[in-house]
């Protein structure tokens, strides 16, 4: 079965994702969709999960910022901490071999 998920993105996150999709459309010469790119990203994430968990453990306890207006800076800092750990976990992972799938 196919599952549908909904994400709420900031304008900058949406722009980044759109650029990523466009990058793979241009470089592959295909009309792939956002879903293709999201599934490919999640394959890479699944491959790196052990390292991602190790790096996430280094973040330590955080307080989830409120979604209220005026809290954008707090949310950006919160997400930046997660992004830093995520990037470190992806860098620390062994190479992904597409032929394994």
Image: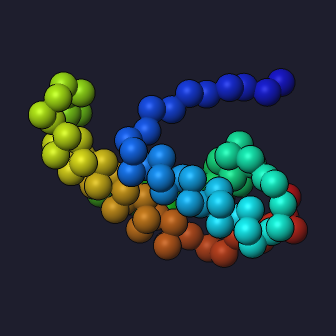
Name the spot of residue 50 as percent of width and height, x first.
54, 57
Does 79 sit left or right of 37 as displayed? Answer: left
Does 57 sit left or right of 32 as displayed? Answer: left
Q: Foreground: 19 or 54?
A: 19
Q: Residue at x 61, y 28 (%)?
A: 5
Number of marks present in the image shown: 0
**94 is higher (above) or lower (below) than 12:** below
Name the spot of residue 9 as percent of width and height, x first.
43, 39
**65 is higher (above) or lower (below) than 35:** above
Q: Residue at x 34, y 52 (%)?
A: 82
Work out whether residue 78 can be spotted.
yes
Q: Residue at x 65, y 56 (%)?
A: 21
Q: How is the image coloured?
A: rainbow
* Quadrant position of residue 74: top left
Position of the C terminus, as image quadrant, is bottom right
Name the spot of residue 19 as percent of width and height, x first.
56, 60
Does 1 sit left or right of 77 as displayed? Answer: right
Position of the N terminus, as image quadrant, is top right
Name the spot of residue 48 as percent of width and height, x first.
58, 60
Q: Foreground: 77 or 63?
A: 77
**17 is higher (above) or lower (below) than 27:** above
Work out whether residue 57 can be spotted.
no
């Amino acid at each position: 079965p196919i599952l549908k998920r909904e994400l709420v993105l900031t304008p900058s996150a949406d722009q980044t994702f759109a650029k990523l999709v466009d990058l793979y459309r241009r470089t592959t010469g295909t009309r792939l969709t956002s879903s293709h790119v999201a599934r490919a990203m999640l394959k890479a994430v699944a491959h790196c999960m052990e390292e991602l968990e190790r790096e996430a453990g280094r973040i330590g306890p955080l307080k989830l910022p409120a979604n209220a207006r005026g809290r954008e800076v707090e949310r950006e800092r919160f997400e930046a901490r997660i992004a830093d750990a995520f990037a470190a976990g992806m860098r620390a992972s062994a190479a992904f071999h597409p032929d394994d799938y």
